[in-house]
Amino acid sequence: METRNGVANPIMVVGQDQLTYSVACSLLDGGHPVLLLTDDRGAAERYVRKEIHDCTKLAVITDWPKEITAKLVILVTPDKLLAKHQCINQVENRASKDTIIAVNMESIGLEQIQADSTRPTRIFGLNWSYPVHRTFFAEIISNAETDPAMLAQLENWVNVYGKKDACTVKNGFSIRARMMAAMLREGLYLVENEFASIESVDRACRNDAGFYMSFVGNFRYMDLMGTYAYGMVMKDLNRELSNRITLPKILQEKKDKEETGMAKGKGFYTYSAEEKAYWDTIFRTFSQEIQQLIKKYPHESFDH
């Protein structure tokens, strides 16, 4: 059995943040060895030990190895094309031609990411939802260049070892990013035009969509409620929805002031150190509880 850095036949995960560490946790929880490449070994190991009982199948490195023997390399990078190309090139210079490379992608298309590759057929998009080891979401993105056998292998790894209920997209872009952007654009439009406060938009999202979306998706929910009513609402409402193509003013101001979220102490809300610790604690607890609830009510459980 081949071993690298004390871990046999690992999946390699590359990245620098909690999302990266959580991807590693998800694979470890599924029983698969992980080789984690990250700048901060201490932060990575502390995070994983906090979330996963058995860390014996984890190896953490801080420099690119001379040779990559992993059959799957998962990259978690900033949503910038150059950063993705640089990371992919590092892998291609060290790995075999059969190594599958999967990289997170939101606004960038898969064709652009594949463009600088020596073998674009083995490059995939792969998106997660944080905390990865508590959610069932994974989005695998392929296109016309994709090797079908490699796609099937990636789907198997993600679903079996990642314990995901993955969706596969075949047009080279993220459907999750588009749906989320549409909802955020409308929410920001409502706030900027003083139709509703930030708090009211959050309450509407949590107490309506947030109530049913952990049970079913939009289409099955419409089936439960009756699709005709939604069609009538859309017919009248579509012309009123925001269709702006520029960044909303409120979001640009937050970016300019570096009010980028809880980690900075301020985003759309303000957070003290105690509040940040509180939200971190209850989010971890909620994630564990909602994970068990979703498992109790699988969306395709009817036995024909």
Image (tube, rainbow, N blue to C red):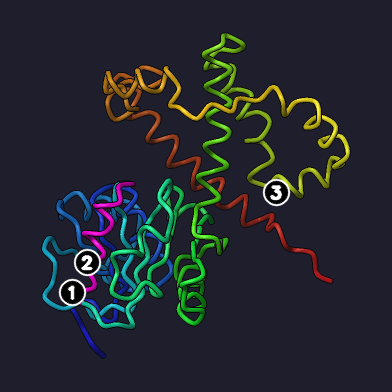
Local secondary structure at mark 3: loop
Q: Residue sitting at 21 percent across and 83 percent down?
A: 3
Q: Residue furthest bottom?
A: 1
Residue at the outermost top position: 194
Task: From the viewer's side, name the closer residue of 161 and 49.
Answer: 161
Give amino acid for label 3.
Val
User: Element under label 1?
Assistant: loop
Q: Amino acid at mark 1?
A: Asn
Do tag 1 and tag 3 residues touch (Cβ < 8 Å)?
no
The residues bearing labels 1 and 2 have C-alpha atoms spaced at a distance of: 6 Å
Quarter of the image with the N terminus is: bottom left
Between the residue at mark 3 and the residue at mark 2, the CA separation in whole angstroms equals: 39 Å
Q: The residue tagged with tag 2: helix, strand or loop?
A: helix
Q: Residues within 10 Å of mark 2 (few under 14, many from 20)?
A: some
Q: Residue at x 42, y 59 (%)?
A: 110
Which numbered circle lies on residue 93?
A: 1
Left or right, 134 with reference to 208: left
- Residue 6 visible to the viewer: no
> Would you identify the image quadrant in which residue 99 lies?
bottom left
* Residue at the image point whose x is 26% and y is 70% from the top: 56
Residue 260: horizontal and vertical position, in percent? Answer: 32, 27
Question: Is tag 3's residue or tag 2's residue first in the polypeptide sequence?
Answer: 2
Query: Magenta residues?
Result: 79-94
Label 3 crowd (10 A; few <14 / some 14-19 / many >=20): some
User: 67 or 287: which is nearer to us?
Assistant: 67
Q: Which residue is mark 3?
A: 216
Cα–Cα span, label 1 and label 3: 43 Å
Q: Earlier in the sequence, mark 1 or mark 3?
A: 1
Position of the C terminus by quadrant: bottom right
Labels 1 and 2 touching (C-beta < 8 A): yes
Q: Which residue is mark 2?
A: 89
Q: Position of residue 64 (x, y in %)?
A: 14, 66
